[in-house]
Image (cartoon, grey):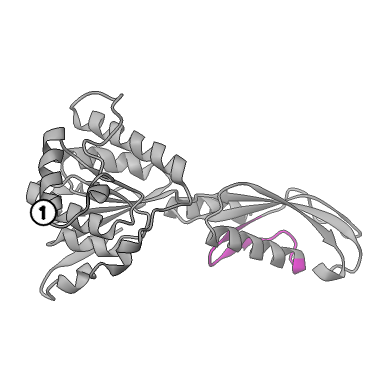
Amino acid sequence: MNDWISALADLQRQGEPCVLVTIIEEQGSTPRNAGSKMVISATQNFDTIGGGHLEYKALQIARDMLANGKHDTHLQRFILGASLGQCCGGVAVLLFEPMGQVQAQIAVFGAGHVARALVPLLANLPCRVRWIDSREQEFPAAVPQGVRKIVTDEPVFEVADLPSGCYCIVMTHNHALDLEICTALLKRNDFTYFGLIGSKTKRMKFEHRLRERGISASQVQRMRCPMGLSEVKGKLPIEIAISIAGEIIATYNTHFGQHTACAESAAVEPIKKWLPSSRRSHATN
């Protein structure tokens, strides 16, 4: 039974990053089988490449790759001997292949027509999606794998829980709510991408209101509105969704492994403290 095959499929289905380790070559008095594989996640490992200190070193390297978000294939040559617990010398070459690395954490505020077209597209990318709205009835009966549905009376308070470097998409059913979320995001100012659905006229109105709330011009300029690729035309929800997804892909391909963390974000009053204990919020995966 090839445990690594089923383990790799399960981890990818769950959206959990892992590293596939393969013996490319080993020469020594007791060589292992070239082609032997094992799968290593942050907390588990499946199958074996023969055990011993070589496997231990492979575990260390793979987990370091996961911890540091490395996504490039890595080939490493080991000189076998006492340092690797081998009684005789030799050479081993291991291939480390990261699988299922998350390239973007995305928050989608709103569950309207465009959001319902957009989220399934994002779910097919190497991303994790938080889908946030106050209206449970607007969500589909089943959300895609890798999407966390969050139903809350106060979507704006979810901004406090977003990871630094998040990709934020604001498209709620209410302009006043859009403005509150935009204000909270721009005060944090540590996102990689922030897009607001709407026209140039909506942007002009929001720029004025955001400045009244103390948001600087340089912060406001980071807001994409209108958002999406200008080359993708059309007003159907799926056409708008494809345009936005294309812009997200172009951005994370450029910025993978980076995020913009501004010094101002450290001084922002925690949003959660504003939330009365009576407010309701629940999430499902």
* Vertical arrangement, residue 210 with respect to residue 240, above or below: below
Q: Nearer the viewer, residue 186 or 47?
A: 186
Point out residue 122 in the picture as x, y percentages from the top left corner.
34, 42
Q: Nearer the viewer, residue 72 or 274?
A: 274
Q: Which stretch appears magenta?
A: 38-53
Q: Nearer the viewer, residue 103 or 237?
A: 103
**Residue closest to the far bottom:** 277
Q: Is residue 264 left or right of residue 48?
A: left
Q: Quadrant of the C terminus?
A: bottom left
Q: Residue at x 55, y 49 (%)?
A: 71
Where does label 1 land, which residue? 212
Point out residue 40 in the picture as x, y percentages from the top left corner.
59, 60
Q: Residue at x 45, y 45 (%)?
A: 255
Secondary structure category for the residue under label 1: helix
Q: Is residue 22 left or right of residue 243?
A: right
* Vertical arrangement, residue 129 with respect to residue 118, above or below: below
Point out residue 109 in the picture as x, y percentages from the top left corner.
21, 50
The reply to whether residue 199 is visible in this rendering is no
The answer to which quarter of the image holds residue 246 is: top left
Mark 1 closeness class: few <14, some 14–19, many ≥20 residues within 10 Å:
few
Point out residue 103 in the picture as x, y percentages from the top left corner.
44, 48
Q: Residue at x 54, y 59 (%)?
A: 68
The answer to which quarter of the image holds residue 262 is: bottom left
Indicate yes or no whether the magenta region holds residue 46. yes
Q: Quadrant of the N terminus?
A: bottom right
